[in-house]
Image (tube, rainbow, N blue to C red):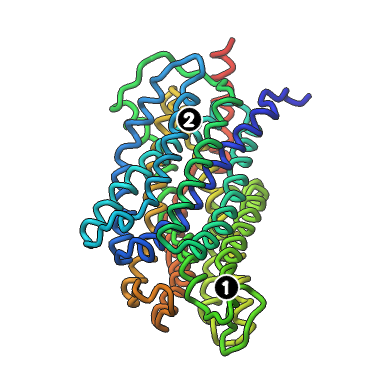
C-alpha cells in the first residue's frame, strides 16, 4: 500500500511561485552585479570582487544567529512562514536599492563609490540570505516523507533555474536602450519589486507539519550540534573547492560582451565573417545554454545518485567536468573559425550540466545532514542547520566571484574600454576563467570528497532509526 500524500498541489504551486520570485532576484544580481560595478559604477574589478566577497563573509557570520532565532520562534503560521512573508518584501526593496548607481548623484571618487556599493550590496546580501533560511528550511517541515521533501526541493530548484532566463533577456535590452546606469536602475526596480512580491506567495499556500521539541535551545547547544555533523563539513569542503565550476557562469556577462567581435549588430566568427546571432542576444544565448544545462543536471543527478550514492556521483561528475574543461581550453575559442564559435556555445551547455549537478548535490546534502544531526542529538534544529548551510553557501558563492575578478584584474581589464573592445590578454583571461578555473577547483575537490562517509548501509540504518523514533514520539 502506498503512503498517503500529505502535500497538496496548491503547496507545490505556491512554493514554486516563491522560488520563481527568488530565482529572478538571484539570477539578476549574480549575473549582473559584477559587470554593473565595473561598467556602470566604474570601479576596478578587484574592488568589485572584494565588495562581494567581504559582504558574503559578514553575512555568513550572522546567519547562525538567525537560524537559532527562527528555531525558537512560534506562531499560528509556523516557525518559518512569517519570516518568508516579510523578508520577501525587504529583499525586493534591497535589490532595487542596489542598482541605484552612485553616479546618478554625481559621486565620482573611487573610495566613495566603493563605500556606497559596499553598503548597498551588504544590505542586499543580508536580506536575500536571511530569506534563504526559512525558505529552504520549509522543505524539511512540510512532510516527513522523503519523496515529498525531494519533490518540494526539486520544484524549487527547477523553477529558480528557469527564472534565470528572464533577466538575461530583459537586462541587455534595457542597458542597450537606456545606457548602463539607467538600464540597470530600471532593471533593479522591475525585478526587485516584482520578484519580492512573487517570493511572498510561498507564505500563503504552504503548511508546516513537522513540529519540534518545546525545549529552548541555546546558541551554544546549536553550535555544538553542528559540529557533530562531520559528513556535512567533509562534503562541504569538496563543494567549496569545486565551486569554481560556476566561474563560467560568472564570467558569461564578460564573454557575451567582449569575447567575440561584432559588426552591424551581429556577432563575428573568429577569423572573420558575420554570424547569424545578434550581438545583444549573445549573452542571452550563453545564459540560456547554462540554464538548459542546469535543468539537465538537476534531472540526471537523482538518477545517478539513486544508483551510485552521493560520493561516487561526485567523483563521476567531477572527473567528466575536468576532462571537458581541459579539452575546451586546448581547443581554444578562436582557433577553428566558425567551429570554435559553436564549440564554445556547446561548452556552455555542458558546463551548465555540471553546474546543475553540483547544485543538486548541495540541495540534497541539506536534508540529508539535517536528519543526521537529529539522529546524533535527538533534537531537530531545521533553522539552525539550514542557516549553517546557507552560511557556508556564502563561501561557495564567493569562490567564483573572486576567481573571476582576480583573473580580470591580472589580465588588464579596463572599464574605460567597456563600450569598445578589450585586449587579447583580457579575452584569454575570460576564456581561462570559463575553462581552467573550473577544472582546477574540481581537481582539488576530489580530495575531501574521498573522506565522505554518510552513504550506503550507514545512511539506511540512520534513516530507519529516525523513522522509528518519530513513530514512537507520535504514538
Task: Please tell me in which quadrant of the rendered image residue 244 appears.
Answer: bottom left
Q: Given the current orientation, which residue lies at the most extreme top position?
A: 475
Q: Nearer the viewer, mark 1 or mark 2?
A: 1
Task: Please tell me in which quadrant of the rendered image residue 111 appears.
Answer: bottom left
Task: Please tell me in which quadrant of the rendered image residue 296 appears.
Answer: bottom right
Residue bearing the label numbered 1 = 279
Q: Tell me residue 120's x, y (percent).
A: 32, 47
The mark found on residue 84 in the picture is 2
Of the numbered discs 1 and 2, the one sitting upstream in the chain is: 2
User: Is residue 240 at least partly visible in the picture?
Assistant: yes
The mark found on residue 66 in the picture is none
Circle 1 Cα neighbour tier, 10 Å, few/some/many (<14 / 14–19 / ≥20)? many
Distance between the alpha carbons at the discs numbered 1 and 2: 39 Å
Q: Tell me residue 56's x, y (percent).
A: 34, 48
Q: Given the current orientation, which residue lies at the most extreme right position?
A: 1
**In the depicted view, which residue is nearer to us: 233 or 45?**
45
Q: Secondary structure at mark 1?
A: helix
User: Is residue 143 at least partly visible in the picture?
Assistant: no
Query: Which image quarter holds the N terminus?
Result: top right
Q: Tell me residue 103's x, y (percent).
A: 31, 58
Q: Residue at x 56, y 82 (%)?
A: 263
Q: Tell me residue 93's x, y (percent).
A: 42, 40
**In the depicted view, which residue is nearer to us: 16 or 243?**
16
Q: Residue at x 52, y 41 (%)?
A: 195
Residue 17 drawn above or below residue 121: above
**In the depicted view, which residue is nearer to us: 9 or 144?**
9
Circle 2 Cα neighbour tier, 10 Å, few/some/many (<14 / 14–19 / ≥20)? many
Query: Which image quarter holds the C terminus?
Result: top right
**As drawn, is 264 to the left or to the right of 90?**
right
**As drawn, is 236 to the left or to the right of 303?**
left
Amino acid at each position: 500500500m502506498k503512503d498517503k500524500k500529505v502535500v497538496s498541489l496548491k503547496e507545490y504551486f505556491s512554493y514554486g511561485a516563491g522560488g520563481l520570485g527568488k530565482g529572478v532576484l538571484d539570477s539578476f544580481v549574480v549575473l549582473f552585479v559584477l559587470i554593473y560595478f565595473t561598467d556602470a559604477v566604474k570601479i576596478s574589478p578587484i574592488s568589485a570582487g572584494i565588495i562581494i566577497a567581504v559582504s558574503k563573509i559578514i553575512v555568513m557570520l550572522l546567519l547562525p544567529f538567525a537560524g537559532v532565532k527562527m528555531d525558537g520562534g512560534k506562531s499560528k503560521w509556523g516557525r518559518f512562514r512569517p519570516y518568508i512573508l516579510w523578508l520577501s518584501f525587504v529583499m525586493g526593496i534591497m535589490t532595487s536599492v542596489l542598482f541605484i548607481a552612485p553616479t546618478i548623484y554625481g559621486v565620482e571618487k573611487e573610495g566613495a563609490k566603493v563605500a556606497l556599493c559596499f553598503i548597498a550590496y551588504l544590505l542586499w546580501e543580508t536580506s536575500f540570505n536571511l530569506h534563504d533560511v526559512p525558505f529552504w528550511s520549509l522543505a524539511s517541515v512540510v512532510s516527513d516523507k522523503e519523496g515529498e521533501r525531494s519533490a518540494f526541493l526539486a520544484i524549487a530548484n527547477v523553477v529558480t533555474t528557469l527564472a534565470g532566463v528572464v533577466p538575461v533577456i530583459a537586462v541587455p535590452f534595457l542597458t542597450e536602450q537606456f545606457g548602463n546606469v539607467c538600464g540597470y536602475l530600471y532593471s533593479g526596480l522591475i525585478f526587485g519589486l516584482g520578484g519580492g512580491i512573487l517570493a511572498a506567495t510561498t507564505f500563503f499556500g504552504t503548511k508546516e507539519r513537522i513540529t519540534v521539541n518545546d525545549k529552548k535551545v541555546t546558541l551554544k547547544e546549536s553550535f555544538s550540534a553542528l559540529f557533530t555533523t562531520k559528513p556535512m563539513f567533509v562534503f562541504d569542503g569538496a563543494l567549496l573547492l569545486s565551486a569554481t565550476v560556476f566561474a563560467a557562469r560568472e564570467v558569461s556577462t564578460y564573454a557575451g560582451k567582449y569575447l567575440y567581435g561584432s559588426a552591424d549588430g551581429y556577432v563575428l566568427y573568429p577569423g572573420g565573417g558575420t554570424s547569424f546571432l545578434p550581438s545583444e542576444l549573445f549573452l542571452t544565448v550563453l545564459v540560456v545554454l547554462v540554464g538548459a544545462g542546469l535543468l539537465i543536471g538537476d534531472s540526471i543527478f537523482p538518477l545517478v545518485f539513486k544508483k551510485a550514492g552521493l560520493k561516487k556521483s561526485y567523483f563521476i561528475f567531477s572527473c567528466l567536468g575536468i576532462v571537458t574543461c581541459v579539452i575546451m581550453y586546448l581547443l581554444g575559442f578562436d582557433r577553428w573559425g566558425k567551429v570554435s564559435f559553436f564549440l564554445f556555445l556547446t561548452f556552455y551547455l555542458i558546463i551548465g550540466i555540471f553546474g546543475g549537478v553540483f547544485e543538486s548535490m548541495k540541495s540534497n546534502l541539506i536534508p540529508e545532514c539535517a536528519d543526521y544531526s537529529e539522529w546524533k542529538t535527538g533534537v531537530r534544529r531545521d533553522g539552525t542547520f539550514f542557516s549553517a548551510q546557507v552560511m557556508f553557501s556564502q563561501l561557495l558563492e564567493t569562490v567564483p566571484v573572486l576567481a573571476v575578478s582576480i583573473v580580470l584584474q591580472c589580465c588588464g581589464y579596463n572599464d574605460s574600454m567597456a563600450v569598445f573592445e578589450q585586449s587579447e590578454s583580457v579575452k584569454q583571461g575570460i576564456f581561462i576563467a570559463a575553462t581552467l578555473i573550473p577544472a582546477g577547483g574540481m581537481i582539488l575537490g576530489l580530495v575531501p570528497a574521498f573522506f565522505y562517509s554518510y552513504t550506503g548501509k550507514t545512511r539506511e540504518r540512520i534513516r530507519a532509526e529516525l523513522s522509528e523514533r518519530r513513530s514512537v514520539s507520535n504514538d
